[in-house]
Image: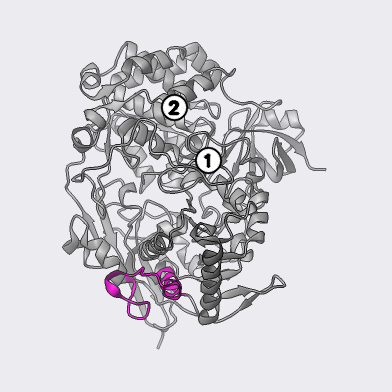
Amino acid sequence: MGTPVREVRTYCRICIAQCGTLVTVDGDPASPVVRQVRGDAEHPVSKGYTCAKGRALPALHHHPLRLEQPLLRDADGTQRPVDWDTLLTDLGGRLAGIVAEHGPDAVAVFYATGAAFDAAGRRTAERFFDRLGTRQKYSSLTIDSPAKPLTAEMVGGWPWLNLVDDDQECRLSLLVGINPIVSHGHTTSMSNPRARLRAQRERGELWVLDPRRTETARMATRHLQTRPGSDPFVLGFLVRELLADGADEAYLRAHASGVDDLARAVSPLDAQRAAAVSGVSVDQLHELLAAIRRAGRISVVTGTGATMAASANVTEWLRLALLTVTGSLDRPGGMWFHPGFLRPVDGLDLPVSPPEGRIEPGPRSRPELTRRFGEYPCAALAPEIEAGNVRALVVVGGNVASSFPASGGIRAALRSLEVCAVADVVETETTRLATHVLPSVGQLERADVPVLLDAFTDRVMSQRTAAVVPPVAERRPVWWSFARLAEQLGLDVLPRGLTWETADDDAIIDPIVARSRDPEALAQAPAVVLSSVERFGWVTGHVLPGGRWRLAPPPLLAQLAELLTSEPGVDVAPDGLLLVPRRLPRAMNSQLHDVRQAGATPQAELLVHPADAATAGITDGVMVRVLGAHGATRAQARVTDEIRAGTVSLPHGWTEPDVNRLTSIVDETDALTGMVRMSGIPVRLEPEV
């Protein structure tokens, strides 16, 4: 007779694009099989698009590494299956004992990418740790992007001013260190990126600054193959020249302060200096400048190629300066600021930060790693564990062991903890080190709204989904785990007096929806709601300190001055090689490296230019040692001219090859954000004998 087949509408929660999908399910309703995922042609934003990772969700859902039952580590280090009561009783008792003896700051939490895509789980976990009273909070923000909220706060007065390009009228878009065809954006999504970039190129011009000829660079009107870390020199040159000829003077008079200080700061960045540092020609720089003058208003979009570099803060500041000088901020034809849908902020009186931002003291072991945005930098976690200040760590949806800088140190620190509890959907390097493993439901097994990703979409929109299939085995929602722990510790973390026995996903999501722009429309699941709210003008007229962009924050002026004192302006290894990260089309960052095929682990190849390969005595396909000042890793070489000479590239988030062995939490932390340099790392290569 066959098995029942149904198709369920939902949306993908692998990346910030959140594409609409249709999931084909068959088999016993109590234990269904997920057969296929395809794009939803009726979704008003993604319009039928989904990427290889989204289409691979059936393989992820049924993956042999899926966590099926709770695991508890015994004294001899082995993990054994237990029931939930045993696991949570043990975990709750240990946490209570640590808090009683050492205080709440002895318990730390890391909110990883997986937590960002789980509305009910993240909200309940936040309530748990807020009520516990710990200040030891960490997130993936300081692994790849703290420069963005930092500069938004210093220049615009509020850290969460998230920029979106005007994809209807913008005539020139400049992409800096970002490959949206693979990543689908960084802090702003780009669903169906090929169509989006093609439309930009047809409407005007698309320029890319990147040391690698990426999939996105191949679509560009022009691609400038810049040296890693040199983005501030190119952007500073553009600002310098436009201030002399081509600035929107009326906009600057009305909406900017510190223009003269900015002009003085970028005055050394003439075409010759910018060309010498960036590795592109003077003619190419002038051609980009001429294109911007022709376009008038522009968009500038940055990604991890820029924000993981040592120069990230200066790059992001000069990006905002360039947009201000061209009159492109908060105006049609340029870029707009996302006002949020689930958390609308355009009608709120937002607190204005001072030019240096809001800073709190750092942790006891590393006081110089100051606390910003309510959390410590990830670089502080291992020192805090080593010093005995953190005795328990709870990881929500992430792989600390392979994503953190100075990986050897963090892995040793994880092993030394009294408690290392991990809530995740698949086995990872971190779950293998855990004392307590909490097998969590995957995205197809829970109801959701994109609560933390609300302002990262390229439309003012939201969507809601019901669970596609019920959870199997002993998988449980993250909110359920924290609600049960909270009960043991006497904490109230669920809304409206609900208990873990009476609540469900929707009971936690409903209050979030109730505060949104359109609760009634979004109450129906699945639903996609687009808002017609005015996107332009609300920041300039309502948020800015004194109605003006602060173009010369003293801490950023100082960082630019320091950058200008070095020659040629970026660090270069003795043999001239700089390592940059990249993403792979089918790898889910540090969670799973390939979901097309159970157990498949593709090579994370080292990209090497033919000239550099010849110098190092390397041929295509050989194993290579990658050596830096702080450590070494090994990788298989792929000799290709898609990367510029003097640059090599490895993906981030792998345990082999492990780029984090090349990083340092002591010598390479940014003074303002505490972020570790993860891109533009000086290295040398040796063929493996």
When the figure is inspected, residue 383 is found, relative to residue 596, above or below; the finding is: above
Q: Is residue 31 visible?
A: yes
The magenta-colored residue range is 476-505
Residue 166: give x, y in percent of width and height: 27, 37
* Left or right relative to 338: residue 107: right
Q: Is 504 within the magenta?
A: yes
Whichever of callouts 1 and 2 sits on the residue coming sooner in the sequence is 1
Which residue, given by chain and number where applicable, does mark 1 sit on?
Answer: 369
Give the alpha-carbon distance from disc 1 to disc 2, as whole Å: 15 Å
Residue 688: give x, y in percent of width and height: 79, 42
Please tell me how crowded label 1 is: few (under 14), some (14-19), or many (20+) other residues with Cα within 10 Å: many
Residue 493: give x, y in percent of width and height: 36, 68
Residue 43: give x, y in percent of width and height: 28, 57
Q: Secondary structure at mark 2?
A: helix
When the figure is inspected, residue 343 is found, relative to residue 640, above or below; the finding is: below
Residue 359: quarter of image: top left
Residue closest to the eye, 450 or 487: 487
* Left or right relative to 191: residue 521: left
In the rendered image, the residue lying farthest to the front is 101
Q: Is residue 67 visible?
A: no
At label 1, the amino acid type is Leu
In the rendered image, the residue lying farthest to the bottom is 1
* Left or right relative to 242: residue 249: left
Which residue, given by chain and number where applicable, does mark 2 sit on?
Answer: 555
- Quadrant occupied by the N terminus: bottom left
